[in-house]
Amino acid sequence: MNVAIVGGGPAGLYLAILLSKLDRGVDVRVLERNEPDATFGFGVVFSEETLGALRDADPETHLEITDTFARWDRIDIRFQGREVSSRGHSFSAIARRRLLEILQERCRELGVTLEFGVEVEELPDADLVVGADGANSLVRRFGNFGTKVRPEGSKYVWFGTDHVFDAFTFAFREIEHGLFNAHAYPYDERMSTFIVECPEPVWRAAGLDRLDEQESLAFCEQLFANELRGRELYSNRSLWLDFPKITNTTWHSGNVVILGDAAHTAHFSIGSGTKLAIEDSISLAAALARRRWDLEAAFVDYELEREPYVERTQDAASESAAYFGRIASYSHLEPIQFAFNLITRSGRITHATLGVRDPQFTRALDGWLGGRPISPPPAFSPYELRGARFEKRFELVESSVAVSPEGRASPEEAVRPEGKLLLRLTHAGRRGATQPRSRGVDLPLADGWPVVAPTKRPYAPFGAIPGEPDEVAVLDAFVAAARAAAAEVLEIDMAHGYLLGSYLSPLTNDEDDRLRFPLRVLEAVRGAWEGPLAVRLSVTDWHPRGNTVDDGIAIARALADHGCDLIHVEAGQTIHDDRPQYRRGFLTALSDRVRNEARVPTLVGGYLTTLDEANTIVAAGRADLVLLDLPETQIERPLQPVTTVLLGEVRA
Amino acid sequence: MKLSAEVNIGIGLPTTVPGATGDLLLEWARRADDGPFSSVAVLDRVAYDSYEPFAMLAAAAAATSRVRLATMIAIGPLRSTALLAKQAASVHGLSGGRLTLGLAVGARLDDFDVAGVEHKGRGKRLGEQLAYIRGNVDGDLVGPSRDGIEILVGGLSGPAYSRMARYADGYAHNGGPPRAFANAAARAIAAWSDLGRPGRPKLWGQGYFAFGDPDRGDAYLRDYYAFTGPFAEKIAAGQLTSARAVKDYVRGYEEAGCDELVLFPCVPGIDELERLQEALS
C-alpha cells in the first residue's frame, strides 16, 4: 500500500503520522507545494475536546504541542469604551509554524517521505491519494466531489502582532464609514493573531479597496492602536479576503479522499478550521485501520462519522459570519447584553451552558435584566410595555377572534372578544371558510361563505376565488372589535396571508402603496385602544418574488411609526406554496433582526420548547417576549397530548 | 408475543427486492399479521422490477385482518389525482379502514419518464392531491369513502414539511440514523405548530435490514439507490445486519419520538421476517 498525501498542512502531516504508525509497511509520501519553512497565517486555535483526541491519537506530538501552547480561559469584549469579560472558555493556540515543525519532525522520525516545492499537476501514482491541500484544493480536480464555493461573511485580513493578548479579544471600533471589529488571541509567549473584519460596504467606503498591503496594515494599526498598546502589526501576505464557504456532496471519489479545508471550511470567526481538519485525519486513519485498508468502506465510515459534526460546525460558523456582517445593528445594546449576544451568536453557547462555565457572568447579566443584584433568570425578568407590566417574558396567552363572521377561518371560530392577555384580531381574508384545523388547513368548506382579498387568486387548491374587500366595513369591524376587547395586549393579525397580511405582499397585492390599508387599520385601532398594541407580521414571505427580511424590517419600522408597540414575528404562509425553513427556533434570527434593525420590541415563538431558549433569547436581546411550545414529556407521553397553551396565569 | 419496544414496529413487504415472488409476498403479509408487527408497508417505484404498491396492499388486505397497510411512501404525482384517490379509497374500503397513505413527490426522474408524467410541477400537484383526498372537494363523486384514511407526507424540503402540516396526519421519514430522524421530526413538529394544527403529527420512520446475506442486501440497496450517486453506499452502510443493530436502531428511534418504525427487508425469504421477529422479542 502506498499513500500520497497532497498538502503538508496540519491535517496532511497528522494523517501521515497516523498512517505510518498504523502500518509500518505502508509507504507514505507528503507532497507540499511550498518550502518547509514557508507558512501562512499566524496562530491556530484548539479546543479541549481536540486536545483529548490528539493525546489519544499520538501522545508523542501531543506532549510537544501542548508544551508550546498559549492557553487562556477568558473572552474580552471591548465595545463603546467598556470591556466585558467572560471566563471559563478553555482555549489553546499554537503558532502554525511551530505546529508544522513538530509534525514534520515526527513524520521524518516515522519514515514519512516529505517532498517540498512540488506542484501536483496530475493525479499522483498511489493506491490512496489524499487531498489535504486546503480550500483551493487541486486534488478536487481529480474526482467528482460536487464542490460548491460561496463567499460568506465580511471582508477580513489576517495579521500578527507582538502585543501578547491575555484573552481571546473581540474589539470594536467605529469610524465615520462604519464599524470595524478585530479578533485577537495569543499563540505563544511573544505573538498574537490579529484579524480585522468589516462589512464590504464599510470596507469600500473607507477606501480599503484602493490601499496596498502596507497602507492597509497602517490603517488597521492606527484604527486599533488602543488594543495593540502601540505595538505593531505584522503582515504575511496579509490581504483583504472574502471567506469561501466550501461544501462537497461527497469527500471521496475512486481512490481519492479529501479532508480539512479541501472538504469543508468553517468561517474563521469560530476558530474551528484546523481543529476540524485534524479531527478528519484522526477519523480517516481510524476508519482505514478498522476496515483493514478497504478504501471504499473506510471512506464511507469516515464520511458518515464526520458529516454530522462538520455540518453542525459549518452551520454555527455561518451564523457567526452573518452575525459579524450585521454587527452595526447591535451598537445600541448595553455592553453586557452586547457581549452575551456575541457569545451566543452561533447557537452553540446558551444561557444555561454559559452559566456552567461562568456563573459570575450570568449572575451579572440576570441582575442587569432583573434590576437587582440577585435576579431570577432572564425569562423571569419583568417587562413593561405601554403601561402593562409583565411578571415574566413568557406570560402571554394567545387567543384570537375574528372581527366579523365573514372574517372567520372556520365556522367553529369565536366572534365575540373574550378576556385574554393577548387577544388577536383577525380577518382570515382568502384563507376563510375552511374546515376545522384538526382535519387539515386551508381545506375549503363545502358550503362556505364568500372570501375577500386584494388578489383574485384562491389561497390554496380548490379554494374560492376571493372577492374585493369592503375596506370601510373591514376597518369598522376591526375598530368595533378593538373597542369591545378585554385584554392586556391587543394584536392585529397582519401575518400568514390573512386579509391584512395579503395587502402587505407583492405576491398578493399589485397596489404600489401596499401599506396603505394595513396602516389605516392600525391607526384606527390605535385610536380605539389605549393599551399595548401588537401586530403579527410575516417578516418574510419565504418566496423569491415576495417580501424579503429587509422588506419585513422596513414594514415593521413603518408599523412602529404608526403606533404599533410590539411586533409579533412570524414568517411565510403569505401564499400556500412558499418555501419555509422549519427547525427549532426558526423565527429567532428573524426576531433578532427586526428588534435590532427596526428597533422595535418583538414577541417570538417558532417552536421554542425550553426555558433555556427563552432565557438566551431575552438576555441576548433577540426578542422581548417569547411564546413557548410546551412539549409533552417522555414520562407523560402515553397520557398527555401536546398543547401549545402557554405558561402563566391570565391577569385581570 | 409482545415487542420490547414502545414504538410500534411495522415491517416492509419485499415488493422491490429482486427474487420476491407473489407467493412470498402474500405469505410475508400473513406472517406479519400473525406476528407482533403493527403495520405492513410498501415502497413505490415504476422503473424497477417491483410490485405496484396499491395492488400489493389490496392483496395484503385480503391476506390480513389486523395490521395497518401503509405506503411508505407512494409517489403521488405519478398518478392522476382522482385515480390516486380511488385507489387509496379502494384499499381502505377493502381492508376495513386500515390504510395509511404515505405520499411524497418522489426522487427519480426515470419513474416520471416511463409513466409519461412531467417531473416539473410535482410538488404543486402533490399539494392538490392532498387537498383533494383530505378535503372531500369532489362531493363524494369518487367513492368509496375516504373518511379515516390516515395520511402521511414525506420529504425533507421546507414545502414538504408545510404540505405535511397543512393536509396530513403525520410525517414519513426516509430513513437514516436516529439523529437524522430526530432532526426531521423537530422540523415536522415546528411546521405542525406553525400551521396551527392541534396536537402533534404522527412520526413514522424507516430502516433496512438483512440478516442472512448482508452482501446481497448491500448490492440491492446500492442498485435501488444508484440514482442518489454517492449516497447509495451510505444508505447501504446503514443496513441493519444483527439483532443488536436492530435493537439499537429501535431504541434510537424511540428516544427520538418515533411513533411507528417500519423495517424493510433487503433479502427475500421468510426467514428474514422470522429473524427480525426474534431480534425484536
Image (cartoon, coloured by chain):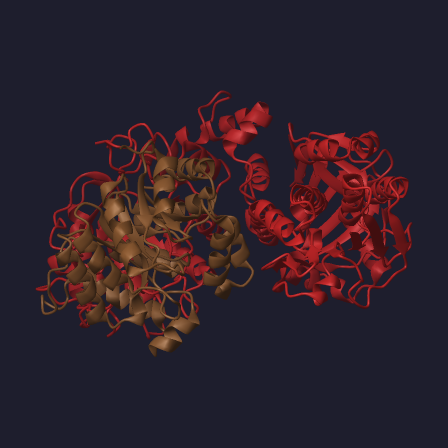
How far across and down, in percent of the image, does residue B60 sit?
22, 55
Compared to residue A121, the image places residue A24 above or below, namely above
Quadrant assignment for the C terminus of chain A: top left
Q: Residue at x 28, y 42 (%)?
A: B37
Looking at the colours in the rendered structure, which chain would you say is drawn in brown?
B
How far across and down, in percent of the image, does residue A447 sit?
8, 64
Q: Residue at x 38, y 56 (%)?
A: A571
Taking depth in this image into account, of A614 and B240 the one nearest to the observer is B240
Q: Can residue B270 be seen in this view?
A: yes
Q: Which residue is drawn at 23% across and 67% down?
A: B84
Compared to residue A15, the image places residue A189 above or below, namely above
Q: Is residue B169 visible?
A: no
Question: In the image, is A322 to the left or to the right of A591?
Answer: right
Name the colour assigned to chain A in the rendering.
red
- Looking at the image, which residue sits at the far bottom? B116
Compared to residue A499, the image places residue A384 above or below, namely above
Query: Where, by quadrant of the figure, is residue A170 drawn?
Result: top right
